Amino acid sequence: MGNIKMHADQKYIEALLNNDSIVIKEIYKKFAPKVVGYIKKNSGDESKAQDIIQETLITVYRQAKEKELILTCPFDAYFFLLCKRKWLNELKKNTTKEVTINEEVVSINDESVQYVDETLVFEAKNELFKEVFDQLGKACKELLKATFTIKSMEEVASKLGQSYGYVRKKKSLCIGQLTKMVQSAPKYNKIKNLL
């Protein structure tokens, strides 16, 4: 991975991670108008466009935080394409008739398409995990949440007032149950097909 050349626009990813309000305002000023224009031309309005922009920034933030996103293409192409795909998904979800999109020629390179695909798969995995996690029993949820925040299993056992051996075995059973639930969810195969 030493060959990856970070794009100068990585500053926007860093700004999201560091909650840098000045650069985040710059993102809205520089990149939001193009998204708003696109959504307005394609059955949307200003309010819907702002929602898509906000959702997209949250998605980019999560991917940057959890997957240490390194941008090697312009932020504009990545951000616009991600917003565009989110909007198309929104239209498909909320309409029974066929969606016709007014396309303008946008220069989008292969890297930005790859980043958008990775981000959408990342987001789909997170949504599926949350849905399935919420279906777990209370004891499993409590135990797994504790292990997400506390690294030492001894501390987890102490916090939950259980023995170390019990907590290790229970964690293994809960992860097994969670994995089985994820793999049997209808969305799982859709996400697998995206990879």
Image (tube, rainbow, N blue to C red):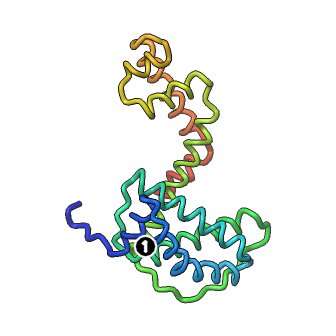
Image quarter hosting the N terminus: bottom left
Is residue 3 depicted above or below 64 in this figure? below
In the image, farthest residue toward the right: 96
Rendered location of residue 135, percent (x, y): 64, 33
Rendered location of residue 59, percent (x, y): 52, 59
CA neighbours of label 1 inside 10 A, class few (<14), some (14 to 19), many (20+): many
Rendered location of residue 10, percent (x, y): 36, 69
Q: Which residue is drawn at 36% across and 56% down?
A: 68
| Foreground residue among 25 and 46 | 25
Rendered location of residue 155, percent (x, y): 39, 21
Q: Which residue is drawn at 58% across and 82% down?
A: 34
In the image, farthest residue toward the bottom: 105
Is residue 22 depicted above or below 29 in this figure? above
Image quarter hosting the C terminus: bottom left
In the drawing, does residue 95 fall left or right of residue 138? right
Helix, strand or loop at mark 1: helix
Q: Residue at x 42, y 69 (%)?
A: 12
Q: Which amino acid is tagged 1?
A: Ser
In the drawing, does residue 172 fall left or right of residue 51? left
